[in-house]
Amino acid sequence: MINLAHGQPRLARRAIHYFEKRPDDPNYAGAWAALSAAYRSEGGFLSIPSCRTRLSSLAKTAIKLNPRLSHAHQFLGGAYNTLGATMRLLRR
């Protein structure tokens, strides 16, 4: 297992590489959430907007597959926050 908490961009890129090879079951929400976490780490380290956009998409997929998966909600909230969407969502 790759520990993304160590704060090394190299580890985030490595995690993305492995998580992109997700299990044969495309309905495994945990794999989608883990991939979104890896993009969150890489996007945070390198401040890459496309990583945050990808993170949002992946987290939404994980939530669609398993609405009770708390990590996916956490990652989606973080993506909205960094993309500046939080205030727009709250105004709805």
Image (cartoon, helix red, strand yellow):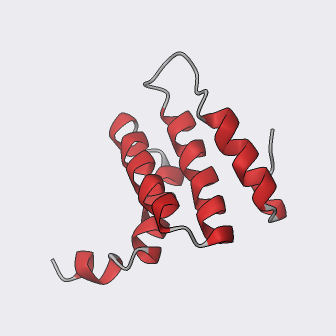
Residue in the picture at 32% in, 75% down: 85
Q: Is residue 83 above or below residue 40?
A: below
Say which quadrant the C terminus sits in: bottom left
Residue 24, position as x, y percentages in the image: 54, 15
In front here: 26 or 68?
26
Is residue 38 something that shows in the picture? yes
Residue in the picture at 46% in, 61% down: 50
Residue 82, position as x, y percentages in the image: 47, 75
Residue 76, quarter of picture? bottom left
Looking at the image, residue 72 sits to the left or right of residue 20; the answer is left
Q: Residue furthest left?
A: 92
Residue 68, position as x, y percentages in the image: 42, 44
Say which quadrant the N terminus sits in: top right
In front here: 31 or 38?
38
Q: Is residue 24 above or below residue 7?
A: above
Q: Residue furthest top?
A: 24
Looking at the image, residue 88 sits to the left or right of residue 81; the answer is left
Residue in the picture at 48% in, 45% down: 69
Residue 2, position as x, y percentages in the image: 80, 44
Residue in the picture at 72% in, 53% down: 12
Residue 45, quarter of picture? bottom right
Number of marks in the rendered image: 0
Q: Is residue 9 above or below residue 47?
A: above
In front here: 24 or 42?
42
Is residue 67 something that shows in the picture? no
